[in-house]
Every structure is written in C-alpha cells, then in structure tokens.
Image: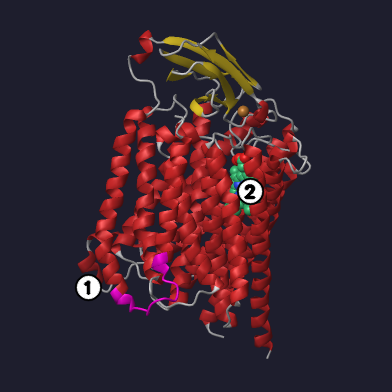
Amino acid sequence: MGNGNLVFEIFSVAAALAIIAMLFLANYRSREPLAQEVVTSRGYALRRYWFWLVFAVAVASFALTVPYFPYPRAGASANAKHFSVVAQQYDFAVSGVIPRDVPVIFDVTSKDVNHGFGIYGPNGAIVGQVQAMPGYVNHLPMTFTVAGHYTIRCLEYCGIAHAAMQGGFEVR
Amino acid sequence: MSADVVNGRAGMRVMWTYIGTGLAIFSLMLLAGILLRAAQAGWLPVDPGTFYSILSLHGAGMIVAMAIAGLGTLWYLVRRETDLDERIAFLAYGFFVAGVISVIVSVFPGRYGSLWTMLYPLPFVGTYWPSWATGTWLVGNALVMLGFMLWCAQILGALLARYGGVRGMLAIDYVFRNRAFTDSGGKPPPPAMFAAAITAFDGFVTGTVGLVIGTALLVHWIDPSVAINPLWAKNLTYLFGHSIANLTMYMAVAGVYVGLPMCTKRAYHTSPQLAVAWWATLLFVIIAYFHHLYMDFAQMQWMQFVGEIASYFAAIPVVVVTVYGGVMLAHRSGMRWSLGSVFLYAGMIGWVVGGIGALLDATIPANVDLHNTLWVPGHFHTYLLEGVLLFTLGWVFVNLEQRADAVSSLLTRWLVGLGMFGGGALFLLPFYSAGAAGVPRRYAVEPPPGPFWASVATVGAIVFVAGFAICVIEGIRLTRLRKSEEAV
Ligand code: HEM
Ligand SMILES: [Cu+2]
C-alpha cells in the first residue's frame, strides 16, 4: 500500500543480481572447459542447499506477508463506518466525506460490468484497491491517515472510456 | 530412403510450418504493439476504440503465435520418439488458421474490443462494436482451442502408448522405485518429453475449461436471458487464459533441453529431480491463476492464501531444476556463443527476471499496489519477449547453424544482441517504472508519468525491431547457405 517504489527497488536489485550471476556462470570464453561429470557432480551437490534456500525464502515470505493481507477480518466490520461505492460505465458514486484516522469500510459493487476501484492518495500513489463486480459487494477496509483529495481510477478494463473513468472523495 | 529419414521429414514439415506461421503472426503483432505503445506516448493519434481493438488482437495474437511455434517444436520432438500421424497435425493447423482468420475478422472490420480476457459481462454490455463481432471473436477462439485440444489428444495418446501409460509417461516408477526400474533396463522419457506431456495434459484441461466458458458466452450471445455468474466466469476465464499463456513457456523450454546440448556437446538426461519438478509444474500451471483474483474480496479466502504460496512454489521447479540444469549445461562447456546458444541462454535470464517481477506481483500486499498497473504487462512481456521468443528463436538458429555448419559474424551477433536485449530492456523497464508509480494498464490515454515512460518504451521497441529484423535476415541467409550447399 503506497509501496510501489520499495517493490521497484527490490525488483531492480534482485534482477541485477540474477543477471550478473547467470552471466558469470555462463563464463564467457574466460576459463578452460570442464568435463560435464565434474560440473554435474558439483552442481548436484550445491543444488540441495539451493533448494532449501529457495524453499525457505518462499515460506518465510509467505509468513511475513500474511499479516499485511488487505482482506476484511472477522468482527472488524461491526464498529467501522461503511461507505457505499457503486461503479458504472464510466464513473464512480461514493457516498459522503470520509473521516480521517478511523477504520472505514467501502462496500463496493458495480451496476454493469467489472470495474476496479483504485484509490490514489493526495501524493498520487495507490493506497488501496478492490474489484467492483456486478452481483457482488466487496468490502474494502481502509484507515486514512492523511487528509486531502483522493482520486479514484478504474483498474479493470470496462469499455471504450475505461481510461477516463475517474472519481474522487475527500478525507477530513 | 530409410524409415528414419521419412519420419524426420514429416516432423520437419510440421515443425517448420508451425514455427513459420507462429513467427509470421508474431512479426505482425510486433508492429501492432509498437503502434499501441506509440499511441500511449501520444505520438500517434489513435482513438480509444481503435486502441482497444488492436490491443485485443495483439494480446490474443501474440499468445497464439508463440503457442503455435512451441507446439510445432514439440510435435517434431515427439515424432522423433514415436509414430505420429502428420495429417492430424495439419488438421489442427487448419483449426488454428481458421480461428486466427475469424479473430482477425472480428477486429477488422468488426472492431471487437473486449480484449483477450473477454470478461463477462463486458463483451455484451455498453460495447462500441456490433454484436456479430463478439460472436466471431468467440468462435475464432473456440476454433483455436479445438485445434489445440486435437494436438493435445494426439500427443497424449502417443506418449501414453510409447512409455506405458501415465506411470511411464510421468516416470513414476523411475522416481519411486528407481533401483528396480533401472535394474530391469527401464529408461525414463527424455527431458523434452516431459515438456510435451505437461503441455498436452494441462493443455487438455485448460482447453476444456476454455471451451466451457466460451460455450457459456456463446449461449449468452445467442440468448441474453441466460445469465452467467460473473465470479465463476472470472475464475474460468483466468484458469484458461493464465494457463495457456504460462504453457507457452513450458512448450518453448523443450528447445533448451534439446538445443543447448547441441551447442555444448553435452548430454541432458532425465533425473528423478527433473521428473518431480515437472509433476509440480503440472499442478502449479493450473492453480497459479488464483493470483488474478487477489483483488476480488468475494473470492473464497483460502484461495487467496493458496494463490500466494502456490505462486511462490511454482518458481522452485524453475530455478532449482529447469534453469539450474540449463546453466549447468552451459557452465564451462567451452561452447561457441553463436546466435542460437546466446538466444537460448539469454532466454533463461529473461525467464528468471520476468519471474522475479511475477513473484513480487504475486505477493498480496504488493499486489495492492501493482494489480492491473503496467507492472503486469511489464513482467509478462519480460518472459514472453526475452524468454519464450528467445527460446523459439534459439531453437530455430541452433538448427539452422547446425545444418549450414556456420555461425553468424561477431558484428551480426552484437547488432542483434544490442537491438533485442538493449532495445528490449529499454522497452521493458518503463513498464515496471510506470507500474510502480501506479499507472494503470490498458489505458488508451495514461495519466503521468505514463506518457513519458511510453515514449522511452517506444524508442526501445523500435530498437528491438531493428535487432529482430537483422536476426530475420541472418536467419534467411543461413537457410540459403544450406540450400546452395545442397545444390552443389
Ligand atoms: C516489442 C514488442 C512488443 C510491444 C511494443 C508490445 C506492446 C504492448 C502494449 C503497449 C500493450 C498494452 C499495455 C497496457 O497498457 O496494458 C501490450 C499488451 C500485451 N502484450 Fe505486448 N508488446 C510486445 C510484445 C509482446 C509479446 C512478445 C507478447 C507475447 C508473446 C505480447 C503479449 C501481450 C499481451 C498478452 C498483452 C495484454 C493484452 C491485454 O491487456 O489484454 N506482447 N503489448
Ligand atoms: Cu474501467
């Protein structure tokens, strides 16, 4: 949530490391060839550790990110204030001014096709999003800490004016 | 003429027909892609309707192009192991061609514009194109699917017969009772056959799902009073769409299994790890699509959790076995860096880099920032353009080089490399930057900083095309080199 830059940095570093490592392993003309058996036996020996490393990183990333999942938690809905959002080709109807620093829940649906309810903060970064699907109401829990004007952009292709489908609300 | 030569000829005919068609469609779609990116940069005046019609064609056309090329390679490789009737391959090809024509007609002159995802109820509500175009698009897709399933059925049947049922085809005894199996003289299928088996099996499953949702949409098209549940439609659409797109990678990787050993003069054998990795892939291809519905909070929640962990685990077979094995093949082999081997090796790098982008996007808290932003086309263009395409081209060049007994000059290699990797990076990086800044995907007109990054990307794409053009000319030169020698 608002972490696009962080993700981009992680990506850049990881991608650069992967590219360098693989180019290094390719060993462009630099050293004597080795017999395949030698490379394979070394490779297989290393692979065990590599497997467990990748496995551990996968499980750890999962465990570390679960607490930050954006889904509504059981019970949280009861005392939060609800705001209804109805998406329709090609605009959003949001009810009221949103209070700052308290948990709110957007009840998001659509009247026609699938849309995406994307909330962009006063600084232009995405702060939250949820799909708007006809026949369903998606509950998006949010707590806004910054007052100002928030822009809504459609984040699911919905027809010819998809790119122009915008809305907004105030947080005070 | 020996039976072997005749066999080889049939395989070659099918393979080059498929690959030639795939690359021809690819080249056209490449130009469509540049048009789209230039429009987003504000350099070309393209109205939104035209933009979305061309985007629909570009997305579907590219996936089909890469799939046809991959299926051709696999068909040839399976044909080397067992008997296959060439006529079925050409029948399937007929379905592909008919389907592609139908899809093209739905866009020109039909102006269909619901994209390749055709997410219900979009193709029917508030459209700017006539209803017949939706029908033609759906029929075209169904034809391609029928051809694909015919291919899958033929390959599955042949592999099951050749290796003794599912247990043999998937090397189950080889993994669990390795000693007994090898002692009794058993041999597991070679690596490329796993790619063929998984493509055929998962292809059949996803093809069936595609036909189910496609038929439902067609029924709704004929009788609008028949309603479809949008959440079900979305699940089926992405199960189908994600898996097909993902499978193009597993088709093309067969080119690495066979092509890289040709370059390195090393052998690539099946190991129990390789077999297990492909079993995992068999499953992950089908369930990884869950990440497309992370932002649908109405989806059952366990699917979101499984989606994240399954997306992570899907990387394990790739980095621990497939790419790892490919790197071991190349590592200190003293091979010549011809265009073919460079493409195959670079394709593995593109696969890994695109995979890193995918894993970050498959992390749910990050997905909140990235879902349906340009990050998404960023990661999949990385492994389609610098992965699947390079595997396909690498396989083609390894074969051309071998038969011409020649490689391209250093200058040619540098020009192609600079164009296709340098231009490619310049085309791809802006997707990630703009995506991280929250610029949505599928916007005919983008909010800032979208247009700036789009102009950088357009330059990159043009450089890429220049490199690709040199690569095509070089390919033709190598082909003719062989012809003239044969004439001598
Ligand atoms: C230099 C070559 C290419 C260029 C310039 C290009 C350009 C584009 C552009 C501008 C988009 C729309 C991005 C957005 O705003 O959402 C797009 C989408 C897409 N492209 Fe490409 N592309 C290229 C290569 C490829 C390749 C090689 C493939 C597949 C093998 C591919 C498959 C797709 C798909 C599946 C979409 C998504 C369509 C959709 O959102 O419905 N593209 N491409
Ligand atoms: Cu929209």
Label 1 lies in ligand 1 vicinity (Cβ under 8 Å):
no
Q: Which residues are magenta?
A: A24-38
Q: Residue at x 65, y 63 (%)?
A: B468
Q: Mark 1 belongs to which amino acid?
A: Asp
**Is any atom of residue B485 visible in this view?**
yes
- Quadrant housing residue A37: bottom left
Coordinates of residue B150 in the picture (x, y in percent): 55, 54
Establish if B160 lies above or below B353: below
- Horizontal arrangement in the rendering, residue B470 relative to residue B163 (left or right): right
Name the residue beneath numbered marker 2: B457
**Tag nearer the camera, 1 or 2:** 2
Residue A37 on the magenta segment:
yes
Q: Mark 2 belongs to which amino acid?
A: Ala
Establish if B26 lies above or below B216: below
In this view of the protein, which residue sits in the foreground, B12 or B393? Answer: B393
| Alpha carbon separation for disc pair 1 and 2 | 57 Å
Coordinates of residue B54 in the picture (x, y in percent): 70, 43
